[in-house]
Amino acid sequence: MLLDSHMFSSTRSRAELRKRLYQTFKNKGVLDTLKVQLRNQLIQELKSPHPAPRPPDGTSGTLLLSACNSMVADHLRAAGYEYTLSVFCPESGLCKDKVCITKEDLLQILQCSPSSAFFRSMVKSTVNVR
């Protein structure tokens, strides 16, 4: 009888410990970080056996891809979508706290004149979503 109560107590304390550990990790953001890392690793594994398609012009397209990813990241940051940004950045290879291509760089790639009204409005504009 003593053995049975000890096993029940041990099982209950393990379950309680597991629950507390889960809550601690969740509250500190460790679980979200692990989920992002696992998602990124899974995506990388799924991508690895297949070479990336090349753009029709035969170039690598890395500048265009970087520009597009930077635009999306900039929008997510400006809109306050922090969780989506934390998932998008590792998947796209961007650093969350660093902008790879600025709006000014992108506008230069698009050959917009810095003296144009469009250029000035794009540089000054912010997203007012929230």
Image: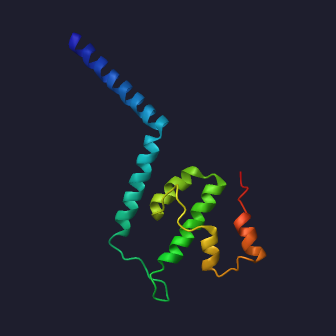
Q: Residue at x 49, y 35 (%)?
A: 27
41 relative to 115, above or below: above
Q: Position of residue 86 (x, y in %)?
A: 51, 53
Residue at position x 41%, y 76% in the image: 52
Residue drawn at the location 65% of the way across and 82% of the way down? 111
Q: How is the image coloured?
A: rainbow
Residue placed furthest toward the top: 2
Residue 113 image position (x, y, % from top left)? 70, 80
Image position of 18 (left or right of 64): left
**Above or below — where is 16 with respect to 120?**
above
Relative horizontal placement of residue 125, taking residue 110 as reference (left or right): right
**Splitting the image into 4 quarters, where does residue 23 fall?**
top left
> Which residue is drawn at the image coordinates 46% and 85% (left, top)?
59
38 or 10: nearer the viewer: 38
Residue that extends furthest to the front in the rendered view of this protein: 115
In the image, taking residue 85 as reference, residue 40 lies left or right, namely: left
Residue 122 point in image, percent of width and height: 71, 69
Question: Could you tell me how many numbered marks the image carries?
Answer: 0
Whether residue 1 can be seen here:
no
**Residue extending furthest bottom?**
57
Q: Nearer the viewer, residue 119 or 129?
A: 119
Q: Quadrant of residue 71?
A: bottom right
